[in-house]
């Protein structure tokens, strides 16, 4: 278990990380997600012992890590620019870190083979490091870390140098690998879809602060505030007025969506009666022909963006300040709806989430 306890990292007056607290469970695939400069790499480096907190403490399995250098921690880091030695072959690269353990030759070979097997590179041990594809180099970097049998593997944007297709394939593989080896993985990424696809839980960070820690589904469906909602996927924001409130829910009135009862967000603070609701673009469905729904809203298509399997429709609704963004599959011909056409959209009131500003 990893405990981040009120950790701050300051550079002069600037706080790259500001009083962050967090617990990561053993065997978890945990991601630190946020825009560039939010402090995620700073936190990862401090867990790995490559940097030290200005204040606060990081505990690994109950032991305070203050002052303990990287090579004496049960962690291992895979860097963004995976430094592989070009003059060594694959197996030698993987064996490199083992040298200081002074294992006998048979045991060393066994561990190298095991690590290469874990990343599906068993057959490429003799290959020169310069004769590898980007994906293979990434695997070697992983094997180099795994061979040390760390309790925690730290991954700093490990897939960012790969093209989209390979990146998606490696996401699946990395997740499988983590489940197979059973150790804790902490991934730093600014790619929301990568974090959603791979993680058990995600911490979303902004400007040195942790905004929300939750499962991918909760981050996406129940973002605590506007900033998280906006960063992770698209979100339509709807102005609303609070007309009722109890301990767990609020009832709000909107001009476009009518009266809605919805779950209260964790950080909800009422400032008078104003509230913001959010609804994801894919939670609005086009109503075709004469179809009707208990919950529907009418507007006009003012723009259209084609994405192959889906189309984004931009829909102006009377009484709404911002047009709605609607993501609809092209199975039924959303890509053929002309700009200027009237449109009706159905929604599930549960899809409307109240957001703290
Ligand atoms: N040595 C340093 N001196 C001063 N400021 C620093 C130093 N290292 C990092 N920072 C600042 O701390 C903030 C957080 O940096 P960090 O590298 O953790 O961001 P990040 O979220 O990982 O971003 P990215 O995705 O761009 O790597 C940034 O504003 C950065 O400029």
Image (tube, rainbow, N blue to C red):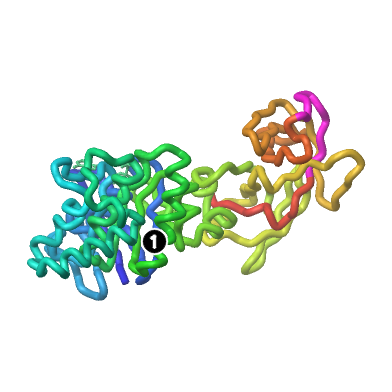
The quarter holding residue 174 reads: bottom left
* Residue on which the image places disc 1: 177
Quick check: which quadrant has ligand 1?
A: top left
Say whether residue 207 is visible.
no
Q: Is residue 326 left or right of residue 215?
A: right
Q: Tell me residue 82's x, y (percent).
A: 25, 45
Among all residues in the image, which is located at the extreme bottom? 62
Toward the right, the furthest residue is 290
Residue at position x 64%, y 34% in the image: 308
At which x and y percent is residue 93?
18, 51
- Residue at the location (29% across, 48% down)? 41
Q: Which residues are magenta?
A: 336-345
The part of the image, by quadrant, that contains residue 344 is: top right
Q: Is residue 321 left or right of residue 215?
A: right
Vertical side of 133 occupied by 145: above or below: below
Q: Is residue 339 magenta?
A: yes
- Image x and y of residue 134, in percent: 33, 40
Image height of 84 relative to 200, above or below: above
Q: Tell me where residue 6 appears, x and y as whole percent.
A: 29, 62
Q: Residue at x 75, y 40 (%)?
A: 331
Which class describes the residues within 10 Å of circle 1: few (<14), some (14-19), or many (20+)? some
């Amino acid at each position: 278990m990893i405990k981040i306890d009120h950790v701050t990292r300051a550079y002069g007056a600037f706080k790259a990380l500001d009083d962050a607290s967090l617990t990561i469970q053993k065997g978890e695939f945990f991601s630190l997600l946020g825009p560039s400069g939010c402090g995620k790499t700073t936190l990862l480096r401090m867990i790995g012992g490559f940097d030290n907190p200005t204040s606060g403490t990081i505990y690994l399995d109950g032991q305070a890590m203050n002052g303990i250098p990287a090579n004496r921690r049960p962690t291992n880091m895979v860097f963004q620019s995976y430094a592989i030695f070009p003059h060594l072959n694959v197996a030698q690269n993987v064996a490199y870190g083992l040298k200081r353990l002074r294992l006998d030759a048979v045991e060393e070979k066994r561990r190298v083979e095991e690590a290469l097997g874990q990343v599906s590179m068993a057959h490429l041990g003799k290959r020169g490091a310069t004769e590898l594809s980007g994906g293979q180099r990434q695997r070697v970097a992983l094997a180099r870390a795994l061979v040390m049998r760390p309790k925690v593997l730290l991954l700093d944007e490990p897939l960012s140098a790969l093209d989209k297709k390979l990146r998606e394939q490696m996401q699946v593989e990395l997740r499988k690998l983590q489940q197979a080896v059973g150790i804790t993985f902490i991934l730093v990424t600014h790619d929301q879809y990568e974090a959603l696809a791979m993680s058990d839980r995600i911490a979303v960070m902004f400007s040195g602060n942790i905004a929300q820690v939750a499962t991918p589904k909760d981050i996406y469906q129940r973002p605590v505030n506007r900033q998280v909602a906006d960063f992770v996927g698209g979100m339509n924001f709807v102005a609303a007025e609070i007309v009722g409130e109890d301990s767990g829910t609020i009832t709000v009135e909107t001009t476009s969506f009518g009266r809605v009862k919805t779950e209260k967000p964790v950080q909800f603070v009422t400032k008078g009666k104003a509230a913001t609701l959010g609804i994801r673009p894919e939670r609005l469905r086009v109503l075709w022909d004469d179809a009707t729904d208990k919950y529907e809203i009418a507007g006009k298509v003012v723009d259209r963006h084609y994405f192959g399997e889906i189309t984004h429709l931009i829909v102006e609704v009377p009484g709404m300040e911002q047009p709605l963004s609607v993501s609809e599959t092209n199975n039924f011909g959303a890509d053929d709806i002309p700009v200027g056409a009237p449109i009706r959209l159905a929604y599930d009131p549960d899809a409307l989430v109240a957001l703290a500003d």
